[in-house]
Every structure is written in structure tokens, then in C-alpha cells.
Image (cartoon, helix red, strand yellow):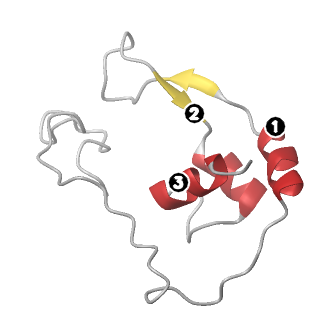
Amino acid sequence: MHQGLSNNSESQPSPSESQSPPVELETDRDLVESLAPVEPREILEALVRIPIETWNYKFEDQSIRHIGPMAQDFYAAFGLGDSDKLIYHVDAIGVCSIR
């Protein structure tokens, strides 16, 4: 579990306080396999059906807001990653790359 995403905020720093390294997305063709094209229209049609909401983490003050889909909705729409509990950065960026 990522630091700061625990219900016990006293023992975990918030994500903004953690000393996490920058996110690197390894998408080098030498490191991936099973490449398959996507249909941009299908991605966009699925994207517009996903609720986008503002929210705060339970460990944060309610005045701190974030925006985005819930992982369960993202997973149901795209089936990306291995869990409906989180959205991988690489998948979110991939969906946002549709043009």
C-alpha cells in the first residue's frame, strides 16, 4: 500500500509528505510485449461514461480536494492493471493520450 493511503494517518505520512522518488513509466519497446492497437473512439466512449468527481482521502482534511475517477469505475471501463483498487499512472496517462 502506498504511504499515506492508510486509515491510520498518525503513523503514515501523507503522499505529499513522503519522500517518494519521481514516477518513472517504463514503456521501452524492449521491456514490453503483446502490443495491440486501440480504437480511440472506443476509449473516448468508455471515458465519458466514467463518473469524474472531486473527493478527499479519509486521512486528509476535507478542505483538501482531488479530482478523478474511482479505481473501480476505471477498471470496469478499461480492465487495465491487476486490481480495481488503484489506477496505475501508466494506464491513466495512456487513456489521457487518446486523440
Looking at the image, tell me whether mark 3 or mark 1 is earlier in sequence order.
1
Q: Position of residue 93 (x, y in %)?
A: 54, 52
Instruction: Name the residue carrying label 1.
Output: 48
Q: Which residue is under mark 3?
A: 87
Give residue 40's position: percent from left, percent from top.
82, 56
Residue 10 bears which disc, if any? none
Residue at 32%, 44% (x, y): give it: 5
Type of amino acid at the residue the image marks with label 3: Ile
Residue name at image x 66 percent, y 83 percent = 35
Identify the element where label 1 is drawn: helix
Q: Is residue 18 left or right of residue 83?
A: left
Q: Nearer the viewer, mark 3 or mark 1?
A: 1
Determine the residue positioned at 21% across, 35% down.
14
Q: Are marks 3 and 2 in contact (CB under 8 Å)?
A: yes
| Numbered tag placed on residue 68 in the rendering | 2
Could you tell which of marks 3 and 2 lies nearer the N-terminus?
A: 2
Q: Does 63 appear above or below 59?
A: above
Q: CA distance from mark 2 to mark 1?
A: 12 Å
